[in-house]
Image (spheres, helix red, strand yellow):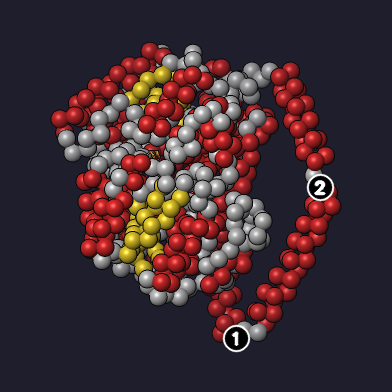
Amino acid sequence: MARTPKYPNPSFFKYKDEINWKAQAENMKEIFGIAKDMIKEVDMKHFWGVQKFKMKDDLNRVKEEFIEFKDMSAAEKADVIINGEKHLGRLYRKGDMATVRREWRGIKDTLYDFKEWAHIWGMLLLTFSKDLIPALNGLFYYRWYVSYFCCHGFADKCMMGLRGSNLRLSHMATYEIFRYVAENLVFLSKCDEKNGNCRELSRKTVLFDEMTMGQIMGGFPDLLGIPHQLLPVFLVSEIDQLTCVPYIDAVESYGLPSDTCPVPSSECGALVIDALPHMGSCFLSSSMPCDGSTMASSYFKRRFPDMPVFHLCFPVRYYDEETVQMGAEDIRACIKFIEDQTGAKWNWDAYFNQIKRFNEETTYELQKWEINKTAHPQFIGPVYELFRKWNYEMDGGADPRTLKAMRKMNKVLLKAYDKKEEPYPGKMKYRAIVWSCPAHYYANFSNWAANCWGIDVLVEMESLNFTKMLETEDKEEALRDLARLYERMVMRRHTNGGYQNVVDELWAQCEAWNAPFVIMYQNVACKNMATVQGILDEQGRERGIDMIWVEHDLMDPRTVSRRSMRDKVSQYMRTVKQAEPIDASLVDFEDDICM
Ligand code: SF4
């Protein structure tokens, strides 16, 4: 049996950089100038005052925690030592960018958590060391780059309150995503003309927009496919809620109306302030049906006028098989475009191998769903949601290491199910579904809902896009399947798929998952979803579904803060459900700048 080639292709890391050292020196001079000005402007008295306050506050907190522990009964002490702490709100402090300390999860889980923390650090250092200079130099070009250095804090927040197998599954999934991010950060830095300037790799790189799925690159094993805006815009906004604010401001100052959806606004703004690396042989854009997203493609073309662009234009008629051939022809033309631009040849064997992996991964995903539909859900929380989106949209079976990890995860999952473990011990009160576009600056919202109110999110709308096993033998049918898949990329099927896909589908899913609770993420700028708001409300009421409407503005937390989002849930729980919180310390806390 032929050996599976290594992923990513090891030669990609080895191509020679052509760094312009003079330009680097000038950039560093500019950076030091900015840093000097910033330091000059700092009110040192205020700065040291804040440090003094924090030191005092830390001491008080330690004292309080000690006294609280001392006053506990022997049984309570044993419970804290073995099962971990219960008041997670105390981990936040007003005005802090990080939590005050890491969570105590009980001896066994804390040890495991630290081991995985070190594991991620080891992977990051090893990956960055594959081309250290451009990888670190990225810090001096892009402010979004810095936010990735907080990825550990992000992981901690997404896993707050998790214990046992759910903690293990979340760590395994996080590791897979972080490794993808770290490797692609190195590639972006390496190819960027301003930074590593590796022309050889750049010529082999195909860029695509952040909604376009990665599976098409399966037929080009000698090329590197990178979603150009994913790391500088989309994903980083999940880690750091403030990253996209300057992008939005920049493009609005160009005249873009402020009620445009922050996804395309941020993409356009990133182009306006030159926050995207200059690289690649060509660009693939998708026909997002939203006006804003189409605009983002035209901004790209204006920012990089010499870059050849292919627009994938799929019909938005998911139940109409007659349109599938049109999509397949679009895919065929796109393959030809990539071949023409890069000189590479489409390889059916490589494509089928990747898709076989992707199909197996889909089987594991369905296994998770089957378990979560039962009375004993196992893998839930933000990491489960993020992993599915990343695996479906970006990995798509490309990386054999992901499949290996998923096989391992499946074993842990089945064992946990056999033992009927509780993913959030003692906090499994309400079964919920999250619907509509998730708030990008609040990735760990479902985690908060579980820890504070016992609302356990079993699945999230974007996970449910498409689960058909893709064709791996017949070439014509494979193209048609790829078209079916691409038609259902993120934010196409539900939010833009019309009544059946967003309204009827929701009630069908509530039934399938036995979830009488819906957290309805209401993006205030999403006109598509606004058209069905009244219908959803009315039908939800008729069906006796608990619908909690949570307004948000995707990448822009200034319109609706995380605190306001939490308030909506808390108000509903208190007034409609007459419920008391499981962890009262999480009902109200300030995290406006906490990453
Ligand atoms: S949130 Fe709505 S408007 Fe924005 S990209 Fe998604 S579907 Fe389009």
Instruction: Please give the name of the residue rendered at 37% of the width and 60% of the height, measured from the top-left corner.
Output: 548
Above or below, 52 against 323 in this view is below
Left-right relation of 430 to 314: right
Pointer 1 residue: 74
Q: Tell me residue 398's x, y (percent).
A: 40, 35
Instruction: Quarter of the image for the N terminus: give it.
Output: top left
Question: 191 or 434, which is in the foreground?
Answer: 434
Q: Dot 1 surroundings within 10 Å: few (below 14), some, or many (20 or more)?
A: few
Instruction: Please give the name of the residue rendered at 25% of the width and 30% of the height, measured from the top-left corner.
Output: 315
Above or below, 40 against 312 in this view is below
Pointer 2 residue: 43
Above or below, 250 against 390 in this view is above
In the rendered structure, which amino acid carries the disc numbered 2?
A: Asp
Q: Between tags 1 and 2, which lies in front? A: 2
- Count all numbered tags in the image, as a single digit: 2
Secondary structure category for the residue under label 2: loop
Q: Tell me residue 196's x, y (percent).
A: 62, 23
Q: Which residue lies furthest to the right in this view?
A: 45
Question: 189 or 298, which is in the foreground?
Answer: 298
- For residue 144, say whether it is visible: yes
Left-right relation of 402 to 461: right
- For residue 475, say whether it is visible: no
Tell which circle, 1 or 2, labels the residue nearer the N-terminal end: 2
Q: Residue furthest bottom?
A: 73
Residue 60 marker? none
Above or below, 434 against 493 in this view is below
Secondary structure category for the residue under label 1: helix
